[in-house]
Image (cartoon, rainbow, N blue to C red):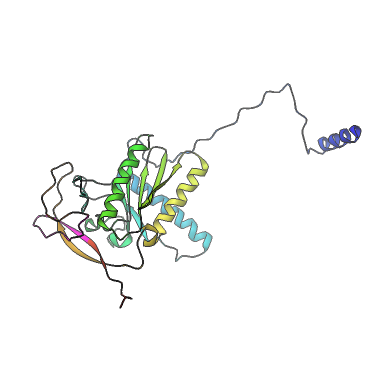
């Protein structure tokens, strides 16, 4: 029996099916590859450059998807954007705690961008009733600060639109991207590394999914119809005292009164479904 096994082993070695171990050789160290992004703004993460980077990833992924699917009708429905005003809080950001907040980047439907330049966002659409996703960018490796800020943005979205089934937030760090989804039952979160191959693939898939997703993927209830109208809001500078506006809070559901010198915003308001008697 041992002779048969020895003969079979020698035959396998002769046919290069196996290689006998060389006890005197030193194993070669394994090479660890670290992925990087040439145009990713890291130190510090500039929000305008980050938005350009995210939209470029989306455009490249869309182009590849159209080529693979052989379908030119596969188009983006949403785009990443940075708030136009760098010094004021985002409209409808005040909650019961009176805090003013401003996301570093947001996701808006294509209707929120001007026809002449697709990447030029209309300021009236930069508010918590219109945005589909709110995001925070941090230059540090620690994801905790970005996660806390994103949760605040998600709470503002839910307060401004209580009819949503859930809210979506996104945080971007020096070497990671995290996506959060929160509803009445809690919060779920996934963190993607930007320094390994699997993480980079998941990152591209995530960005592509965001720009081609329907409103339902961002928590919109298809049973509720939404109408839009323009209102004027008074928005103070960041960290300034909260103005006294009576019922003008995100949780009241009341449309703010028009005030001179305010910012024009596109307010989304729920209406009764058309299919109800």
Judged left or right of residue 2, residue 239 is: left
Residue farthest top in this picture: 24
Question: Where 64 sits versus 143, above or below?
Answer: below
Judged left or right of residue 3, residue 259 is: left
Q: Where is residue 229 in the image (x, y as percent from the top left)?
A: 21, 65
Q: Quadrant of residue 136?
A: top left
Q: Which of 50 and 143 is in front in this view?
A: 143
Q: In which quarter of the image is the C terminus?
A: bottom left
Q: Would residue 81 be counted in the magenta stretch?
A: no
The residue range painted magenta reads 251-266
Q: Where is residue 57 in the image (x, y as percent from the top left)?
A: 42, 50
Which residue appears at 39% of the width and 56% of the height? Answer: 211
Judged left or right of residue 157, residue 180 is: right
Q: Would residue 253 be counted in the magenta stretch?
A: yes
Q: Position of residue 276 (x, y in %)?
A: 32, 75
Which residue appears at 50% of the width and 39% of the height? Answer: 196
Which residue appears at 89% of the width and 35% of the height? Answer: 7
Q: Nearer the viewer, residue 254 or 175?
A: 254
Q: In which quarter of the image is residue 233?
A: bottom left
Residue farthest front in this picture: 185
Question: Where 167 sits versus 115, above or below?
Answer: above
Q: Quadrant of the N terminus?
A: top right
Q: Which of 80 and 224 is in front in this view?
A: 224
């Amino acid at each position: 029996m041992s002779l048969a096994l020895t003969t079979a082993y020698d035959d396998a070695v002769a046919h290069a099916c196996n290689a006998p171990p060389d006890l005197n050789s030193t194993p070669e160290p394994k090479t660890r590859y670290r992925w990087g992004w040439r145009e990713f703004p890291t130190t510090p993460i500039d929000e305008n450059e980050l938005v350009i980077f995210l939209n470029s990833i989306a455009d490249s992924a869309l182009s590849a998807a159209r080529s693979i699917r052989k379908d030119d009708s596969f188009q983006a429905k949403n785009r990443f954007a940075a708030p136009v005003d760098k010094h004021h809080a985002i409209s409808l950001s005040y909650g019961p705690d009176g805090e003013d907040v401003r996301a570093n980047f947001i996701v808006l439907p294509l209707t929120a961008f001007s026809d002449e330049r697709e990447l030029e966002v209309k300021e009236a659409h930069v508010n918590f009733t219109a945005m589909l996703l709110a995001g925070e960018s941090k230059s540090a490796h620690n994801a905790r600060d970005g996660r806390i800020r994103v949760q605040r943005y998600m709470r503002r979205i839910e307060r401004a639109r209580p009819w949503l089934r859930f809210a979506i937030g996104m945080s971007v760090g020096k070497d990671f991207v995290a996506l959060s989804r929160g509803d009445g039952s809690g919060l779920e979160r996934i963190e993607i590394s930007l320094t390994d191959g699997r993480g980079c693939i998941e990152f591209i898939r995530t960005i592509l999914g965001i720009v081609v997703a329907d409103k339902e993927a961002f928590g919109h209830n298809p049973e509720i119809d939404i109408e839009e109208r323009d209102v004027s809001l008074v928005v103070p500078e960041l960290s300034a005292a909260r103005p006294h506006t009576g019922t003008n809070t995100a949780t009241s559901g009341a449309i703010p009164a028009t005030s001179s010198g305010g910012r024009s915003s596109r307010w989304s308001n729920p209406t009764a479904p058309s299919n109800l008697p």
